[in-house]
Image (cartoon, helix red, strand yellow):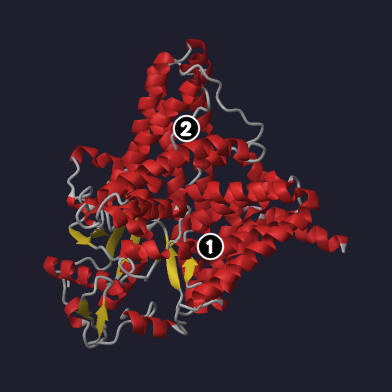
């Protein structure tokens, strides 16, 4: 038995404990099950693996920059920066090495629940947040129970995260319906707490009318448009804070943090801000790289194993509905956080660190969901709420995860605080029962509550027995099949479009085009390059296949897109306006998961160009 356990330990330590390798394996299996060519399976697995490695490098740069930032800001305000005996990197290399097992096991639990219960109709497809929430759960359980058996931690963590992935899209579904206009996609993001609080809070406070005060009727100054680029906004805000802090910080402290640097302090401060932003850029690049493979692999698995299931997608898919509300929420969130940063420092409570990614995405969530209920006033409310939650959460969270991974508090979304604090609190209460017994009791209760909720909700949810039935009900073409010639498809906007399938008999208009590249280079763009552009890439590829157009489709964030040149660029209007010269054909879309809508938008643009 000991030899068997040793073998399992070797496999775990050298395979499953390596996030990059595990993600690569999942991508390979998912692509292979879709009968992709060998070269695509191998390339996809390697890209996913390299993406995780790049992500980890970005995390190291990003979290490494927090130390100098906190020390100098603390000195400027006469405070001691928060100290920790451990780091996130140390946790993921030690007890946190179980995280890959939690991800793999949790996704199996998730798929089983979706398969069994009719109410569990969404498949969670936001890969990078699968990783982070698994880290939060592992760290929280270790905080509550100390050094526990890794297999128990993996089993309990898998059950908890699997239930979360099932329930989270469900509790945001009513508000998602108001934002998106239909039930075709769910929300898969760890800012669901902010989305719910912003939507229902704005409604309870009766802040405004969603039509009369719609944020999209407002006009924001173009001078603020640079905030759409998270790299630029991060460098700008962090740079301003660092320059101000340098003026008031103790000179000896500044020199100590500068180390061997020979430049002037203000130049060093700007370089640190740029390094900070570069760490985030590298992190996002790595996320985009592995998501571009792992999400299609997950989606392929869900489509084949779970017919009729709908995707739960990253938060940016909602940003297409109210881009102005996103900016209102982000600005309100940032201003609120900066004000609280001064208040906290003045009161001697804590030295806050502006988490620009969380301010952007959480503020955007608060803006979009607040606007859906109460217009721009609701958007402001949602942004302010996110700023308060991030500030208070960072303050308390640093202590909650102080013995495992305190940086989780700085990097956290709102759901991290809710789930993490709940687990630590419940674990502390059950600790007298013993770690193993208490862990399994928590898991059993969560699974039982999840099943009860799904049964109750399922009584009001019609069962979908197949993808074909779902397609018939929604008017959408099947995911992997072309729409029959002459049929009609209803888009999410309610419009009806006639579609045709390109066959040998109908391909002549396409082959007759002489000035179009033999293979079109198509680029899908969005704000961060992780959510809506990735979804749009898949949809656009299907649409182009139905049009009979040979093309390679890639996705990128708005910042990276500026340095690229393509034949066709596709995205929402607000982002296309930021990259006017990167492609001769620009295609505006609003329905990222509607193949019929994207196909008709592409058809119109290509016909106008003379390429179809």
Q: Residue furthest front?
A: 205
- Position in image of residue 35 (x %, y %): 50, 76
Residue drawn at point x = 47 percent, y = 62 percent: 171
The x and y percentages for residue 129 are 50, 54
In three-dimensional space, the C-alpha distance between marks 1 and 2, rounded to whole angstroms, equals: 29 Å
- The image quadrant where one finds the N terminus is bottom right
Q: Identify the image quadrant of the C terminus.
A: bottom left
Secondary structure under tag 1 reads helix
User: Percent position (x, y) of residue 247?
Assistant: 39, 15
**First in residue order: circle 1 vs circle 2:** 1
For residue 104, above or below residue 149: below
Q: Can you name the residue that lies furthest to the top here?
A: 251
- Left-right relation of 602 to 104: left
Image coordinates for residue 397, horizontal then vertical, percent: 57, 39
Residue displayed at 29% across by 77% down: 546
Q: With respect to residue 125, does 557 lie above or below?
A: above
Q: Taking 261 as reference, is 2 left or right?
A: right
Which residue position is annotated with label 1? 165
Asked whether the viewer can see residue 84, the reply is yes
Instruction: Tell me the residue at 53%/57% (across/down).
Output: 130
The residue nearer to you, when weighing 63 against 603, is: 63
Residue 105 in sight here: no
Left or right, 371 with respect to 80, comes to left
Secondary structure state at the residue bearing disc 2: loop
Query: What crowding class fits label 2: few (fewer than 14 Cα within 10 Å), some (14-19), or many (20 or more)?
Result: many
Q: Residue furthest right?
A: 1
Which residue is denoted by mark 2 in the rendering?
353
Give the vertical position of 362 relative to 572 (above or below).
above
Instruction: Please identify the quarter of the rendering in which residue 263 is found.
Output: top left
């Amino acid at each position: 038995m000991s030899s068997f356990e040793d073998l399992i330990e070797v496999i775990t330590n050298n395979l499953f404990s390596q996030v990059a390798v595990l993600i690569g394996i999942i991508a390979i299996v998912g692509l292979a099950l879709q009968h992709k060519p060998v070269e695509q399976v191998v390339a996809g697995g390697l890209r996913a693996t390299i993406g995780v490695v790049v992500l980890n490098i970005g995390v190291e740069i990003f979290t490494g920059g927090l130390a100098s930032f906190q020390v100098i800001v603390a000195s400027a305000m006469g405070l001691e920066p928060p100290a920790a005996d451990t780091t996130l990197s140390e946790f993921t290399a030690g007890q946190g090495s179980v995280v890959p097992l939690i991800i793999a096991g949790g996704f199996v639990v998730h798929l089983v629940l979706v398969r069994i219960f009719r109410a569990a109709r969404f498949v969670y497809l936001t890969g990078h947040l699968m990783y982070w929430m698994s880290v939060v759960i592992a760290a929280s359980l270790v905080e509550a129970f100390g050094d526990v058996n890794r297999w128990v931690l993996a089993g309990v963590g898998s059950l908890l995260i699997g239930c979360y992935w099932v329930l989270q899209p469900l509790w945001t579904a009513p508000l998602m319906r108001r934002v998106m206009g239909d039930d075709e996609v769910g929300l898969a993001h760890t800012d669901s707490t902010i989305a719910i609080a912003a939507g229902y809070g704005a409604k309870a406070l009766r802040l405004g009318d969603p039509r009369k005060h719609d944020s999209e009727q407002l006009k924001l100054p173009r001078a603020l448009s640079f905030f759409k680029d998270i790299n630029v906004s991060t460098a700008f805000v962090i740079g301003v804070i660092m320059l101000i802090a340098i003026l008031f910080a103790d000179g000896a402290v500044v020199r100590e943090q500068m180390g061997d640097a020979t430049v002037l302090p203000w130049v060093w401060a700007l370089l640190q801000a740029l390094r900070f932003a570069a760490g985030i850029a590298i992190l996002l690049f790595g996320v985009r790289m592995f998501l571009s493979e792992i999400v299609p692999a997950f989606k392929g698995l869900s489509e084949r194993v779970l017919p009729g299931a709908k995707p739960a997608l990253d938060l940016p898919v909602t940003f297409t509905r109210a881009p102005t509300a996103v900016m209102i929420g982000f600005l309100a969130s940032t201003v609120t956080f900066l004000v609280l940063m001064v208040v906290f420092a003045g009161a001697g409570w804590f030295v806050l660190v502006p988490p620009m990614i969380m301010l952007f995405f959480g503020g955007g969530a608060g803006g979009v969901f607040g606007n859906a209920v109460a217009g721009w006033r609701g958007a402001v409310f949602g942004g302010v709420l996110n700023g308060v939650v991030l500030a208070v959460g960072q303050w308390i969270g640093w202590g909650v995860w102080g013995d495992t991974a305190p940086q989780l508090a700085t990097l956290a979304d709102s759901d991290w605080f809710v789930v993490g604090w709940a687990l630590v609190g419940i674990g502390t209460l059950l600790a007298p029962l013993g770690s193993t017994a208490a862990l399994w009791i928590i898991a059993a209760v969560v699974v039982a509550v999840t099943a009860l909720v799904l049964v109750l909700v399922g009584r009001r949810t019609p069962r979908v027995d197949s993808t074909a039935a779902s397609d018939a009900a929604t008017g959408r073409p099947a995911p992997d099949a072309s729409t029959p010639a002459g049929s009609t498809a209803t888009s999410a906007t309610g419009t009806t479009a006639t579609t045709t399938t390109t066959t040998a008999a109908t391909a002549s208009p396409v082959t007759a085009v002489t000035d179009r590249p033999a293979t079109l280079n198509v680029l899908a763009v969005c704000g961060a390059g992780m959510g809506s552009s990735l979804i749009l890439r898949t949809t656009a590829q299907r649409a182009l296949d139905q049009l009979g157009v040979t093309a390679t489709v890639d996705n990128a964030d708005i910042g990276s897109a500026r340095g690229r040149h393509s034949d066709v660029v596709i995205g929402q209007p607000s982002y296309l306006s930021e990259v006017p010269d990167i492609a001769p054909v620009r295609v505006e879309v609003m329905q990222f998961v509607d193949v019929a809508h994207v196909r008709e938008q592409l058809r119109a643009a290509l016909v106008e160009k003379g390429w179809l």
